[in-house]
Image (cartoon, rainbow, N blue to C red):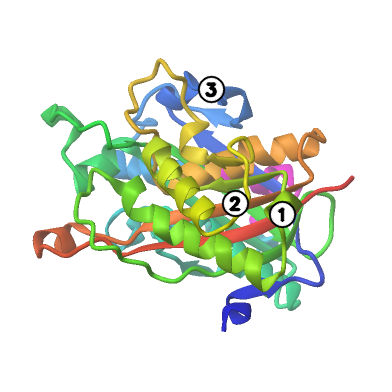
Amino acid sequence: MERKRTWVFENKPVIISTGTVGGPFEGNGRIAEDFDVLHGDLWLGQETYEKAHKKLIEDASFRAIEKAKLQKEDIEFFFGGDLINQITPTSFSARTLGVPYIGLFGACSTSMEGLALSSFIINSKGAHYILTAASSHNAAVEKQFRYPTEYGGQKPPTSQWTVTGAGAAIVAQEGDGPRVVSATIGKVIDMGLTDPFNMGGAMAPAAVDTIISHLTSLKLDPAHYDLIVTGDLGSIGRRIAFEMLTERGISITDRQFQDCGLMIYKDSQPVFSGASGAGCSAVVGYGHLLKRMKKGELKRILIVATGALLSPLSYQQNESIPCIAHAVSIEYQP
């Protein structure tokens, strides 16, 4: 059963280009130089934060298409999603792109959900070029899931800062770039947590479940990877996941096991437990980590994007928080 959760891509689909876009807070962060575009304000010249969110996706998508030296007509499918009701920003960006579209919702796991599905189709020769993207906008997401920024509500130390950013990638049958080797699809794990200000703690068990399934089904030692990087567990969730892996007999070093939510911002930035949002693993993965691979610093990485599948409706009905994690294995050897 566990083997069926993992796809091995014999043809090794290639990520031929990426596009990453961030906001002003990200521009002051630790990996600012790894973004293709940084906007100076949260509005991006738009009337609302939600429309600005749509523009983030469009900017990242068109940048990826431009860097691949393609036209949007060359893209056969667009897979994408975000955190806003009915993934409206992504669907409206698909209207602009005019590409056959499949909308995804995996919360903050959407980046690797899209990359896994794109790679599966490319590996099966169902398309030549697929665009996949994930995004979030701090002001739009905070307004929906927590409190509007203008409210000035005090957050607890367990909370995380939603990334304003979008990451897009073009997956192809041929070309130069990092290759997707395998993917493990997550199961929904719900440990009964109900606090929307502690996403890291809620998502950690899902990340552990997927990592163990991936390593077990492929008979891999964690040392096979230079890095195993979770999506946005933050400092609290990462510590919980590390302890759970150790208890399960998974030998992994503190340096080898990292988290996208702890890579984006500087220690001086007030982000509490770290970064989060569907754009978190998208911009770190498609920007920072793939650039490190191309520089020769990393040869094999496993990105495990985590998502909390709650909504304002589920919270209002006193539901607990179901979580999921999707893992994608990427390698690059020029």
Q: What is the spatial separation of the Cα atoms under label 2 and label 3, in whole angstroms?
A: 19 Å
The kind of secondary structure element at disc 2 is: strand
| Residue 64 falls inside the magenta stretch | yes
Q: CA distance from mark 1 to mark 2?
A: 8 Å
Q: What residue would you read off at disc 3?
A: 30
Of the two numbered discs 2 and 3 on the same chain, state the one appearing first in sequence: 3
Residue carrying label 1: 330
Q: Is residue 141 left or right of residue 95?
A: left
Q: Which mark is residue 173?
A: none
Residue 288 location (% of width, % of height): 63, 35
Q: Which residue is mark 2?
A: 303
Q: Give the camera-side residue of 96 and 323.
A: 323
Q: Which mark sits nearer the N-terminus, 1 or 3? A: 3
For the N terminus, the image quarter is bottom right
Image coordinates of residue 242 in percent, x first then y, are: 49, 46
Answer left or right for 104 relative to 97.
left
Span shown in magenta = 59-72
1 or 2: tag closer to the N-terminus:
2
Q: In terms of secondary structure, where does tag 3 sit?
A: loop
Can residue 237 be seen by looking at this rendering? yes
What is the crowding at mark 3: few (fewer than 14 residues within 10 Å), some, or many (at least 20)?
Answer: some
Looking at the image, which is closer to me, 324 or 54? 324
Under mark 2, the amino acid is: Ile
Residue at image point 38% right, 70% down: 188
Labels 1 and 2 touching (C-beta < 8 A): yes
Count of numbered marks: 3
